[in-house]
Image (cartoon, rainbow, N blue to C red):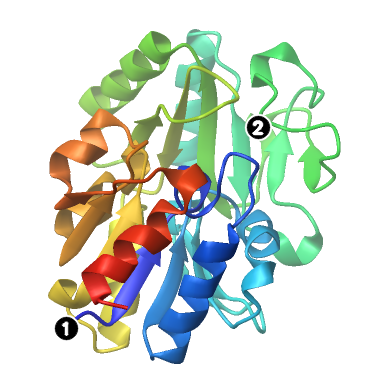
Amino acid sequence: MYKLIAMDLDGTLLNDDKQITEENLRLIDKLIAKGYEVVIATGRRYWSAKQLTKEIGKPLVILANNGNVVRETITDEIIIKKYLDLEDFKLLIKEGKKRGLHPIVHVDNYDKGYDIIIEMEKEHSNYYSYLNQSEKRYRKVDSYLELEDGKILAVVYAGDKEDMEDFHLDINKRYPRKYSSHVMENIQVAEALLEIMNPLGCKWLSLLEYAKEKGIAESEIIAIGDDNNDTQMIKNAGCGIAMKNASERVKQVADIITEKDNNESGVAFELKRVLEI
């Protein structure tokens, strides 16, 4: 019997217009009414995820920044936090600069009104339009290397897939166990995104930690997603579901691949069948 359902946002619960379809909204309402624990597990920052899910209209737990910070939406209380060590962060920045790479840094400063730190103007081409024109929740600094704030959730690089894969592999080979990282492909802002975090920072580990606190076993978890940051939770959950529009890496580890994509309410369609709703 399943008790917890973890859903990714982009490419999964959200359609390409970044909206939750009416069918998905109705399904979530039914799940909550039936007593299922519904968790949003996303690479997005908490503020953004909370805004995009407000139509659900029910209290939620959000695993944001790939599980590096977990909050509940009523009081915004932090349930789990995993920050990148400050010295490891600065080492990473130096390695990236050797390659001419310029990251955007996600930090846990939700209460201070910003979640992102940048060194250049937000419109700079090196950021690949990662930040939209209306973005206000950011802080510009002269140098990442001068930071003294240790609340770093993720370092995000955008660029060509080959460059991101090469840096990803190099960092893991030269600095084993210092970082957790993955390359995302199902995105719109660039060919690929490389996200680098605390070595224990991944959706699955934080989801598992939360589930255990609730007395829920791995076998009682359903996880559904579409991109490479969802791989571990889809592989390890009691039932792992990949979206029809998922990356090949995700599909390879899934128990089920949805018949419908994120624009066709694939989440609702598949969960109704699995849970016999």
First in residue order: circle 1 vs circle 2: 1
Q: Is residue 195 above or below residue 53?
A: above
| Residue nearest the observer in this picture, 224 or 200 | 224
Q: CA distance from mark 1 to mark 2?
A: 47 Å
**Left or right: residue 87 compared with residue 165:** right
| Residue nearest the observer in this picture, 23 or 132 | 23
SS at mark 1 in the image: loop
Residue type, mark 2 in image: Tyr
User: Dot 1 surroundings within 10 Å: few (below 14), some, or many (20 or more)?
Assistant: few
Where does residue 102 sit, x and y in percent of width and height? Answer: 60, 19
| Residue nearest the observer in this picture, 271 or 155 | 271
Residue 82 seen in render? yes
Q: Is residue 146 above or below residue 76?
A: above
**Left or right: residue 212 compared with residue 104:** left
Q: Is residue 247 above or below residue 21?
A: above
The quadrant of the picture occupied by the N terminus is: bottom left
Residue type, mark 1 in image: Met
Residue at 32%, 78% (x, y): give it. Answer: 277
Residue at 37%, 36% (x, y): give it. Answer: 245
Can you identify the residue that label 1 sits on?
Answer: 1
Residue 144 shows which numbered tag?
2
Residue at 55%, 50% (x, y): give it. Answer: 14
User: Dot 2 surroundings within 10 Å: few (below 14), some, or many (20 or more)?
Assistant: some
Where does residue 78 sit, x and y in percent of width and height? Answer: 55, 75
| 1 or 2: mark nearer the eye | 1
